[in-house]
Amino acid sequence: MVSFHRTPNGLEVRHRHEVLTIEAWGADSVRVRAAQYRIPSESHGALDVAPAADPPAIDVDDGSARIVHGELTVDVTFDREAPYPEPLLTFTRTSTGAELLAESREHFWLPGARHFQGNRSGAYEIHQRFAAYPDERLYGLGQRTHGRLDIKGLTLDLVQRNAEVSIPFVLSSRGYGLLWNIPAVGRVEFAENGTRWQAGQAREIDYWITAAPTPAGILARYADATGHAPDLPAWASGFWQSKLRYLDQEELLGVAREHRRRGLPLSVVVTDYFHWSAMGDYRFDPAEWPDPRAMVAELAQMDVELMVSVWPTVSPLSENFAEFRDRGLLVGSDQGVEFHQTIQDKGMAAPMPVAFYDPTNPATRQYVWDLIRRNYLDHGIRVFWLDASEPELNPAHPQNLTMYAGPGAEVANIYPRDNARLFAEGMATSGREPTVLLCRSAWAGSQRYGAAVWSGDIPATWESLRRQLRAGLNIAISGIPWWTTDIGGFHGGDARDPAYRELMIRWFQYGVFCPLFRLHGDREPRTPTSYAQTGGPNEIWSYGDEAHEIISGLLQLRERLRPYIHEQMTAASRAGLPPMRPLFVDHPADPRAWDVDDEFLFGPDILVAPVTHPGQRSRRVYLPAGTRWVDAATGEAVDGGRTREVDSPIDRIPVFTREGADIPLSA
């Protein structure tokens, strides 16, 4: 038998050992949780407090129930004639009755739609299965390297890796958004015969679904549920200069001075890894960086921020290692010693094992922030690069980790979120405004801590550039409004090579319309990873006169766009609407807008069509229906709903503005 029990904000359903709860969780949205015997009292997911909303209407009948909450209706049915009956959920749009998503059994006999397989630890391997729909398109799920915008038909791991950012939120063309609110290592299958979410080890099934009437509304509801990004600081919308890596204080200052000598805009310059005395010391090596306070002061006179790289790694040679270890502030191991990576840090003759601190532990967050405050913030540094924050494991066995929050198998995916939380909480307790935290990984809710994500250590190739377009759009759909790439790619690229110079120009033309505008990379000649590592030249004057002239113009274009960019960032903060987004977000009624994956909108008024092939000097551009668009190069106004062949000489890519918009694209 099945039983239904009303709760203050929803419904509890019990059948055999399973308890299932459906709670109103923001407008047009519910949170569904299911577990054996009882719902766990603690959750490490992204849903902390339910957003304010009117209470749902609940109707209970013999063997069925209905919850109506704004535009989302949830029907609970129980087929007593089934061999092994279970409560099944169907989600529909209230105003139309259209089915959005429905649970589907894995097998007509057993297992059912929700599957719990115990592992003798009190946890379970869990499955949650839904029906598949042949016309459905799915977007989001973080940032991936598969090169697809529509992820329908893919099977994807739910695990953090370099360049693979797992944020388990999807937006459907059927009109719903769904967050898999479980940070366990697992996978999701968007197959033709069903959608199945899986966690290798978890205590419950936990997901959130919304039926806001538009894609923009879905993103707004998602931000309400998981947290809104702060407003972007004024300095952060300009140009960020970086390379792997400036070896000392004088080299870095020389680059900033040269930017000013040439009249080139510059907002941020970067001190990359190995600037420290040892991993875990969290301070400058005085032999290379003798006067950080004076360095920051000189940069401030040029209106340039210094960003420093902070890794979560702790070397056994660090002056702080014993305290990290003895206070239990390191990530532990289910089996083996507490070392999860190897690298050749300062003081090492060869690569040695290093540990990771545990940001899920409040005591770790307090201890690490005290080091950051004393050694960086007190010198005037307020921009932090949280690299290798997946964390980057070797071997890649997150299930072997143990953390304050729980076993790695159950909670590993929240590591980058809580690492950003460490710095956001630290800035708040220090009385500072929110900053930009450049992170290589994220999870649901990371945006509330000011996490900006870049696309990781990607190849310096045309194929890689093409993949960035889709990666950036999917992570935008996943709730991260601040995103960027290593312009030019990370791995390789020779500044002397004319073929690579063309790629660099085209990447810059794309990058100027990314939320953050940042040059970085390990250029030729490259050397093995170690504290002695530095890359080849990667300043814009390194790429020859033609590239310098074109890129200089792009830096000036970015300066003109900054007021518009901040308008879009304010919209992102208030309404969860990312500045870089697929065409369908603004044009959901245009069927073709759901298919275009090599163009994007930058705010509502700029359409960008990057050039992503060598030697390409024109490309086809689709203009969404329902408005007129103006070619930024020619001034010609044309109706939307059509495709045009647009000239793309080496000094520009196709860019269109919405007719009537006042966008300063021309000098």
Image (spheres, rainbow, N blue to C red):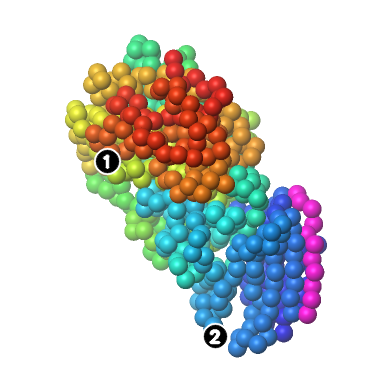
Q: Is residue 480 left or right of residue 148?
A: right
Q: Residue at x 29, y 26 (%)?
A: 650
Q: Give the secondary structure at mark 1.
A: loop
Number of marks in the rendered image? 2
Q: Is residue 149 visible?
A: yes
In which image quadrant can residue 304 be found?
A: top left
Give the x, y percent position of residue 204: 60, 68
In-front residue for pair 84/391: 84
Q: Is residue 57 magenta?
A: yes
Which residue bears the numbered disc 2?
Answer: 109
Q: Is residue 431 left or right of residue 525?
A: right
Q: Residue at x 75, y 49 (%)?
A: 52
Label 2, residues with CA under 10 Å away: few <14, some 14-19, many ≥20: few
Q: Is residue 321 magenta?
A: no
Check the image and report above or below for 194 versus 266.
below
In which image quadrant can residue 318 be found?
A: top left
The three-letter code of the residue at mark 2 reads Trp
Which residue bears the numbered disc 1?
Answer: 461
Residues in magenta, as a range? 52-62
Q: Quadrant of the N terminus?
A: bottom right
Q: Is residue 331 visible?
A: no
Give the x, y percent position of residue 252: 35, 23
